[in-house]
């Protein structure tokens, strides 16, 4: 077997086929596969068409990771297969692994919830790239020896010529020619003479001392370098782990073609995956995939067939059994720095229902949306004496025209008397449109604008004490605690003075409210009935 590069040349430069012929051949393969699949679904000559369907995947499998994943499990019962039942959700990962292998990426970072298949698809990727490049060593690192033992055994299962995977069909003639279970190493080759000093795959725990023992020339793959939350929340240990990663693993990379695949829970902005994103996230040669377990309505994004993954009921149980910050890190991919959290959940005042009397005032404040990923945030406060109950909040990154209608409807439906709207950039026009729409709807809200000139971070930090003292937030078990309210509280309770904050709109709007109601006039607005 002659290994063919994607350029269409042998290693010695002899031409095998033109690149456009390669593309055409595999495009025809896809067309044939689509026709065969259609006939299978229609019940036409099922056995032959199914055989043809898998032959097209076999033709593509050495070059295309998606076909490889499908083909090697073709003889496994569907309910026991890994890839096809999860393909809808995992296809973006498969495509990114393809880009990594094709040299379009130098670094791929993946953060997904536990148990959705991120490690197994990485194992499939290792099996695929090792078949394509059996004489280039790959290095796998983790903090957990049991994890590495399990991965070593699973890779041997994939490579087993007599096993349930069809890896040997994709790479005929290749096989495992040496193993070392003690040191977790194995080599692939065509004969024993192909065995090398640096093995095709080596697995090692971080901190075990790898100088001169292992090497990465094809892939450096690291998985869950952080042992858990206690380590993640200790900055000194994170700094030490980062140094260990670089000296123990990153320095084992040899040559310009070696790529890095990193998988892990996003515990901290200071963990290795977080630091790599800070360093290389915008260089055009890196990609970071970070998917939560559920959408903002708490509908599962990983509800696989055969009872696999997470159901909506599972999400509900997670909400009930995990504390908010751990849940955010492990299941929603939101790294938190607890030592720098400005609004610690345990410090917040909570309530289940409004007091059983008319409020002194109903107020709202709106931080308008400026950019595509920004949120328009508008909390509605019910004032009782010197306390402000945040009973409703808009936290929405929809288009401006959608937000204008939502804001206007909320002001009218909630009978808000006064609303201040930030007037930075397009805020003044936004406020004019809202006032017009409120009037059309028969509302009575008086809308004012204020240009915010103070430094945002300084204002957020300075206002937090007053906000925590005067504002009450809905309890998570309260009836009005909607998914949108939860999104807003997640933004608030993960805002850190120690790290980078992807969304600061909610703490920002609370700082504006404090500035409006507690600082500007050094008193509290009280709306009273006329005495005559």
Image (cartoon, rainbow, N blue to C red):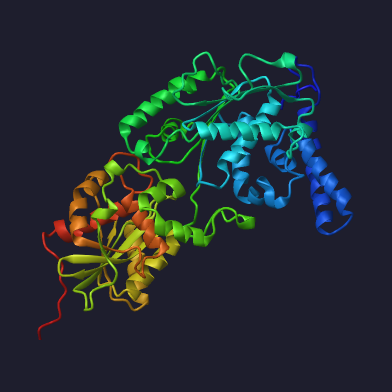
Spot occupied by residue 359 in the image (x, y as percentages of width and height): 21, 75
Q: Is residue 16 above or below residue 438?
A: above
Quadrant position of the C terminus in the picture: bottom left
Q: Residue furthest bottom?
A: 532
Residue 438, by quadrant, is: bottom left
Residue 425 in view (yes/no): no
Quadrant position of the N terminus in the picture: top right
Q: Is residue 364 above or below residue 36?
A: below
Residue 139, by quadrant, is: top right
Spot occupied by residue 353 in the image (x, y as percentages of width and height): 28, 72
Residue 229, by quadrant, is: top left
Which one is in front, 368 or 313?
A: 313
The residue at 74%/40% (across/down) is 164
Spot occupied by residue 42 in the image (x, y as percentages of width and height): 83, 59
Which one is in front, 374 or 222?
A: 222
Q: Is residue 491 above or below residue 528?
A: above
Which one is in front, 27 or 209?
A: 209
């Amino acid at each position: 077997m002659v290994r063919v590069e994607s350029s269409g040349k042998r290693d010695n430069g002899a031409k095998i086929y033109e690149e456009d012929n390669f593309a055409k051949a595999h495009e025809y393969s896809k067309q044939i596969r689509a026709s065969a699949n259609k006939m299978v679904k229609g019940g036409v000559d099922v056995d032959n068409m199914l055989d043809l369907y898998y032959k097209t995947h076999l033709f593509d499998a050495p070059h295309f990771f998606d076909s490889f994943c499908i083909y090697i499990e073709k003889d496994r019962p569907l309910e026991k297969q890994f890839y096809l039942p999860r393909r809808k959700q995992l296809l973006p990962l498969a495509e990114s692994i393809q880009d990594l292998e094709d040299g379009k990426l130098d670094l791929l970072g993946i953060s997904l919830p536990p148990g959705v298949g991120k490690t197994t698809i990485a194992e499939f990727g290792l099996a695929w790239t090792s078949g394509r490049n059996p004489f280039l060593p790959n290095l796998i690192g983790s903090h957990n020896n049991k994890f590495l033992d399990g991965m070593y055994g699973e890779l041997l299962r994939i490579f087993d010529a007599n096993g349930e995977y069809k890896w040997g069909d994709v790479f005929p003639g290749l096989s495992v020619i040496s193993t070392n279970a003690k040191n977790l190493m194995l080599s692939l080759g065509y004969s024993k003479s192909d065995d090398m000093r640096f093995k095709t795959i080596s697995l090692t725990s971080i901190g075990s001392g790898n100088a001169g023992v292992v090497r990465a020339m094809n892939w450096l793959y690291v998985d869950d370098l952080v042992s858990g939350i206690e380590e993640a929340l200790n900055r000194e240990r994170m700094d030490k782990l980062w140094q260990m990663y670089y000296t123990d693993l990153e320095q084992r990379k040899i040559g310009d073609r070696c790529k890095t695949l990193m998988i892990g829970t996003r515990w901290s902005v200071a963990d290795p995956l977080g630091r790599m994103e800070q360093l290389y996230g915008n260089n055009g040669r890196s990609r970071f995939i970070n998917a939560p377990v559920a959408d903002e309505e708490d509908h599962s994004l990983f509800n696989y067939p055969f009872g696999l993954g997470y159901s909506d009921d599972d999400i509900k149980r997670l909400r009930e059994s995990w504390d908010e910050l751990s849940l955010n890190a492990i299941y929603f991919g939101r790294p938190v720095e607890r030592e720098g959290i400005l609004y610690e959940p345990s410090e917040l005042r909570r309530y289940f229902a409004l007091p059983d009397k008319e409020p002194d005032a109903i107020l709202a404040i709106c931080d308008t949306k400026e950019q595509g990923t920004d949120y328009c945030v508008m909390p509605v406060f019910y004032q009782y004496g010197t306390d402000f109950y945040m009973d409703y909040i808009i936290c929405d990154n929809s288009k401006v025209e959608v937000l204008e209608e939502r804001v206007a409807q909320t002001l009218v439906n909630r009978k808000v008397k006064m609303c201040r709207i930030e007037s930075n950039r397009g805020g003044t026009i936004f406020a004019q449109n809202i006032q017009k729409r409120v009037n059309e709807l028969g509302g009575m809200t008086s809308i004012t604008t204020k240009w915010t000139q103070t430094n945002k971070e300084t204002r957020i930090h300075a206002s937090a004490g007053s906000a925590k003292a005067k504002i009450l937030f809905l309890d998570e078990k309260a009836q009005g605690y909607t998914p949108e309210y939860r999104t807003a509280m997640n933004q608030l309770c993960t805002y850190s003075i120690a790290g980078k904050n992807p969304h600061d709109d909610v703490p920002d709007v609370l700082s504006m409210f404090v500035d409006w109601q507690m600082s500007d006039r050094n008193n509290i607005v009280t709306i009273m009935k006329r005495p005559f």
